[in-house]
Amino acid sequence: MELTAEEQAILAGDQGPAARKAMEILVALGTIYGAQDLVPVSSVQVAGVSYGNVGQAGLEFIREWAEEGARVKVPTTLNPAGMDLEAWPEMGVPEEYARPQLELIEAFRAMGIATTCSCTPYLLGVRPQLGEHLAWSESSAVSYANSVLGARTNREGGPSALASAITGRTANYGLHLDDNRQAQLFVDVKCSVLSVADYGALGYLVGQRAGDSVPYFRMFTGRKPGLEELKTLGAAMAASGAVALYHVEDVTAEARLGGVLGKDVSSITIESLEEGYEALDGFGQDIDLVWIGCPHASLAEIERVADLLRGRTLVADLWITVARTVLQSASAGRLAEELQTAGGRLVADACLLGAPLREMGFTSVATNSAKAAFYLRSLQRLEVRFGSLPQCIEAAVTGGWKP
Ligand code: F3S
């Protein structure tokens, strides 16, 4: 790899052991993936934030790096933690989980990272421009940045994202390069795809067939997907496959510019979403918890839930996971009160996949997120129902699932 004089100096330890370790990680990755050089990044998003996922070994690793003097050079945010960092006692999170989770967040803070824990940094003012290089980790955020915004990032692991934050660079390979951003799979969608859950089911089906290739969608539906549908589509394809970039004709950034369909594309046709719904939905009749907000909910999604709930009270728990800054916005504050009156709550900072849900007494969850449905079953071994938002809200009101 060709390194600049400054990069060579960092590698030689001129900026201390923490920066040297970061540069060693980037050079090792770049060498493995055949990168010619490093490119500057404008922002970083770090995964590996939930104590439930990284455990004590992960906490020690981050703490040690911070103590060696690791400090970030570019704006850096965190992926969700395993609990609301403020309201965890009311959520019933056990203290033996909460304490190390808070210590982990402190170690990130010591590095100069904004401890905004969200998988939707693009809803928090971090809105990269077309062609900008990033080092983001969370698969759904990576997909949104690459596809909807046309920025460029590989899916980074926790340590490699931190290495980029500390050096301000990433190895120049994969989706940073023009050639790798061409679509290889043409997806002709011939059925109606309307709701967020529909986009999740579509993403689930296409992700399975796409693997890590780049799909190009031509949609039958006349209504263009918005932010909520696109973040769901990307999240689902990253869960059932390893899709980190997709194009939607006339919608996503690079598709609008044209020329993104590769030469030897294979193609598939989607005639129905039924198979996707069947694969994601389970059989349980009783619902303990309804989870909305995977990826983290936008204000519009919170409003939609509040509209569906107005004047009703809940039997099951209803949690909407959001970024704290979204929760703090004035209208969300009003909506949070409305939700609380009905018996629901906005949960900030958290991803429920990393939360100790079984220890908290939950056994069955309903969600309108394909990604949540996919992983809740495989990682948390919970009974899961997957359906539309109105169906989920009905389940929260009645405590039961109506097909
Ligand atoms: Fe975000 Fe967790 Fe879903 S990180 S995308 S809420 S699985």
Image (cartoon, rainbow, N blue to C red):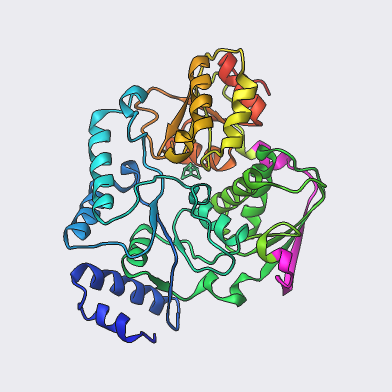
Residue 6 vs residue 229, the one in the foreground: 6
**Left or right: 231 with respect to 92?**
right
| Residue at image coords 44%, 45% | 118
| Residue at image coords 22%, 67% | 18
**Picture coordinates of residue 112, whole percent (x, y):** 28, 56
Q: Can the viewer see residue 256 in this picture?
A: yes
Q: Which residues are magenta?
A: 255-278
Is the residue 202 above or below the residue 4 in the image?
A: above
| Residue at image coords 39%, 79% | 31
Is the residue 388 above or below the residue 231 in the image?
A: above
**Would residue 262 be counted in the magenta stretch?**
yes
Residue 128 vs residue 82, the one in the foreground: 128
**Would residue 386 be counted in the magenta stretch?**
no
**Left or right: 360 with respect to 396?**
left
Location of the C terminus by quadrant is top right
**Left or right: 263 with respect to 364?**
right
Q: Can the viewer see residue 368 in this picture?
A: no
Residue furthest front in the image: 330
Is the residue 249 above or below the residue 336 in the image?
A: below
Is the residue 289 above or below the residue 208 in the image?
A: above
Residue 215 vs residue 163, the one in the foreground: 163
**Picture coordinates of residue 182, whole percent (x, y):** 66, 71
| Residue at image coords 57%, 55% | 144
**Picture coordinates of residue 180, whole percent (x, y):** 59, 73
